[in-house]
Amino acid sequence: MKQAIPLLLIAFGLSACAQASGDVRPVYTPATNYSGLTCDQLREKLLNVQSKVAVVSGQQDQKRKVDQAATGVGAILFWPALIAMPLTADHKRELGILKGEYEAIGRAAEMKQCNIMAPPGT
């Protein structure tokens, strides 16, 4: 019984780790939010959101690494500390929203038949 408690805490600690950025699902955003933009504006917006996704993905993955390291150290050195382990900010919600925006911009560009991957002005 005494051995089961640390194992349960380790399992709980590992489940509390932040989700990997690649596993965060997009939050649905209607393409109509972007229907008033021109193809050039859609391209610019897409690049902006794409840049933000990269930054927030890095933050989310860093959060996951910190959580995993803290859990590993806590499990090995002092498992009762896992109960009180402070969790740093998780960027899952923000990342999901950005991924949803990215998809919506792509759908809006498709509806307008924009080639948003082409150089501006084409």
Image: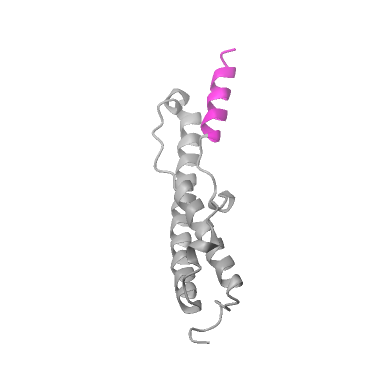
User: Mainly helix, strand or loop, the magenta region?
Assistant: helix
Q: Quadrant of the N terminus?
A: top right
Tell me, yes or no, whether the highlighted magenta stretch contains residue 13.
Answer: yes
Task: Say whether residue 4 is magenta.
Answer: yes
> How far across and down, in percent of the image, does residue 24 sit?
55, 49
Q: Nearer the viewer, residue 75 or 104?
A: 104
Nearest the camera: 106 or 21? 106
Q: Is residue 62 visible?
A: no
Q: Position of residue 37 (x, y in %)?
A: 46, 72
Residue depicted at 60% across the width and 77% down the height: 113
**Residue 91 locus on image (x, y percent):** 44, 48
Is residue 120 something that shows in the picture? yes
Residue drawn 54% across and 22% down?
6
Magenta-highlighted residues: 1-15
Q: Is residue 69 above or below residue 115?
A: above
Front in this rendered view, residue 2 or 22: 22
Residue under the point 57% across and 29% down: 11
- Residue extending farthest to the bottom is 122
